Amino acid sequence: MTKWNYGVFFLNFYHVGQQEPSLTMSNALETLRIMDEDTSIYDVVAFSEHHIDKSYNDETKLAPFVSLGKQIHVLATSPETVVKAAKYGMPLLFKWDDSQQKRIELLNHYQAAAAKFNVDIAGVRHRLMLFVNVNDNPTQAKAELSIYLEDYLSYTQAETSIDEIINSNAAGNFDTCLHHVAEMAQGLNNKVDFLFCFESMKDQENKKSLMINFDKRVINYRKEHNLN
């Protein structure tokens, strides 16, 4: 089976009030089984302890490297970080909790820095982490994603509201989510591949069907845009 350049990610956090840790693990293992047996998705995010820049005086760290297969990406956390990544021609990993406008601004900083340092980034492809929750009832899809994220955002004291984050990800019926994903890719000049997280979906059978359908659509999208 051809392996395509996208994958999944898991939010390494669960809140006790929602479900037992064993169920969280069971659902994650089911996602991995579906990936292995029913789709061509293959990447899973693993955060590295290494960092792109470190001052030996004050131990300042800019952003972590993220290992995806044999490739290393840099988490796009700030203009300073993406400028440093561009200097070395390293691809970015855009965050799920940033607004689309911020992602675009960071990409613009990256491209400007690459031009400044005369770095060829024509073949560089970035990644974008997105939560996906598909339900024929869009209100239910957004509610499930909201429940999944609320304790995490409270724990991390995120400045962005849940509503803003949901609007920067994909929750709704299938066609709406697919259109939203395509819009975000186009907004980033079709320079991104995706890492999806389906774990907010409560219906496991629906999750399997969604992953298989998304797999087919993303493959077609990549073919249409000559991203093979």
Image (cartoon, helix red, strand yellow):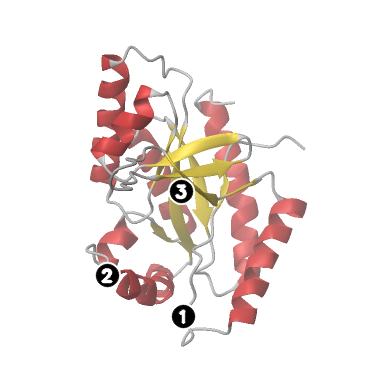
Residue 153 vertical placement versus 172 (above, below): below
How far apart are the alpha carbons under marks 3 and 1?
Answer: 29 Å
- Could you tell me the amino acid type at mark 2? Gln
Can residue 189 be seen in the rendering of this structure? no
* Mark linked to residue 157: 2
Instruction: Report whether 208 appears left or right of 197.
Output: right
State the image quarter where residue 121 is shown.
top left
Mark 3 or 1: in front is: 1
Residue at x 56% of width, y 43% of height: 67
Q: Residue 210, how many percent across, how many down?
A: 59, 58
Of residue 55 and residue 1, the one placed in the foreground of this image is 55
**SS at mark 1?**
loop
- Could you tell me the amino acid type at mark 3? Leu
State the image quarter where residue 155 is shown.
bottom left
Residue at x 30% of width, y 47% of height: 60
Residue at x 44% of width, y 32% of height: 91
Q: Which residue is mark 1?
A: 15
Residue 194 vertical placement versus 151 (above, below): above
Task: Say whether disc 1 or disc 2 marks the residue closer to the N-terminus.
Answer: 1
State the residue lying farthest toward the bottom.
Answer: 17
Q: Residue 58, how many percent across, how many down?
A: 28, 47
Instruction: Report whether 106 appears left or right of 68.
Output: left
Task: Say whether disc 3 or disc 1 marks the residue closer to the N-terminus.
Answer: 1
How far apart are the alpha carbons under marks 2 and 3?
Answer: 30 Å
State the residue lying farthest toward the top.
Answer: 118
Instruction: Report whether 101 appears left or right of 9.
Output: left
**SS at mark 3?**
helix
Of residue 224 and residue 155, the one placed in the foreground of this image is 155
* Mark linked to residue 178: 3
- Could you tell me the amino acid type at mark 1? His
Q: Residue 171, how many percent across, how many down?
A: 41, 61
